[in-house]
Image: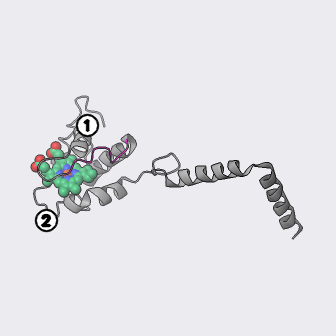
């Protein structure tokens, strides 16, 4: 138990060195870190989670439109998704589609948007080959 006492002593000494305001600031910093959007390098952005949270209520978990939104684009159909460029998918997400698809505007960071677009492609196995003039991935 000697190590415990030693550790406690060290904490007490540290607390004495740090002024209370500094401790408070450290605490606030930790709190801010905890509340920040989960997009830092320490958090993996999940396209699946984003899609299921924001898109699946219309486009369906697997990309096939839900019965209540039959006019939503079938994102499980590769022939459709291959014809959309990454840019146009991003734009659709940002600006929405009249009359029923909402504009998500600033809901997603640029990084989240890219992951989401990649996930949309994954739903149909689309490589976007027809969408890129250079035939790239
Ligand atoms: C409230 C229902 C709804 C939600 C939520 C929704 N969409 Fe849509 N989406 C639609 C409808 C309806 C269309 C077809 C619009 C049209 O006919 O042009 C569409 C079209 C699309 C298209 C095809 C655009 C094109 O150029 O043909 C893509 C890609 C798309 N949505 C992706 C998404 C993604 C990704 C999300 C989640 C971030 C999402 N949608 C959320 C209803 C929705």
Residue for point 65% across, 52% down: 24
Which is nearer the eye, 32 or 48? 32
Q: Nearer the viewer, residue 56 or 84?
A: 56
Find the magenta span and give its range.
102-109
* Location of residue 129 (image quadrant): top left
Left or right position of 5 against 22: right
- Residue at point 45% right, 50% down? 37
Q: Which mark is residue 68?
A: 2
* Quadrant position of the N terminus in the picture: bottom right
18 with respect to 99 (left or right): right
- In this orientation, does residue 75 appear? no
Which of the 4 image quadrants contains residue 15?
bottom right
What number is the disc on residue 87?
A: 1
Left or right: residue 16 compared with residue 135: right
Callout 2: helix, strand or loop?
loop
x then y, percent, for residue 91: 23, 40
Label 1 crowd bin: few (<14), some (14–19), many (20+), radius 10 Å: few
Q: Nearer the viewer, mark 1 or mark 2?
A: 2
Say the numbered circle drawn on residue 16: none
């Amino acid at each position: 138990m000697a190590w415990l006492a030693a550790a406690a002593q060290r904490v007490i000494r540290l607390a004495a060195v740090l002024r209370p305001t500094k401790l408070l600031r450290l605490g606030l910093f930790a709190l801010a870190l905890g509340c920040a959007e989960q997009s830092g390098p320490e958090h993996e952005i999940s396209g699946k989670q984003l899609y299921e949270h924001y898109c699946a209520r219309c486009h369906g978990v697997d990309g096939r439109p839900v019965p209540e939104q039959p006019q939503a684009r079938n994102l499980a159909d590769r022939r459709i998704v291959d014809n959309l460029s990454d840019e146009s998918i991003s734009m659709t997400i940002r600006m929405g589609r009249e009359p029923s698809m909402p504009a998500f505007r600033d809901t997603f960071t640029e990084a989240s948007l890219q992951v989401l677009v990649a996930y949309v492609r994954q739903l149909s196995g689309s490589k976007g080959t027809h969408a890129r003039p250079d035939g790239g991935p």
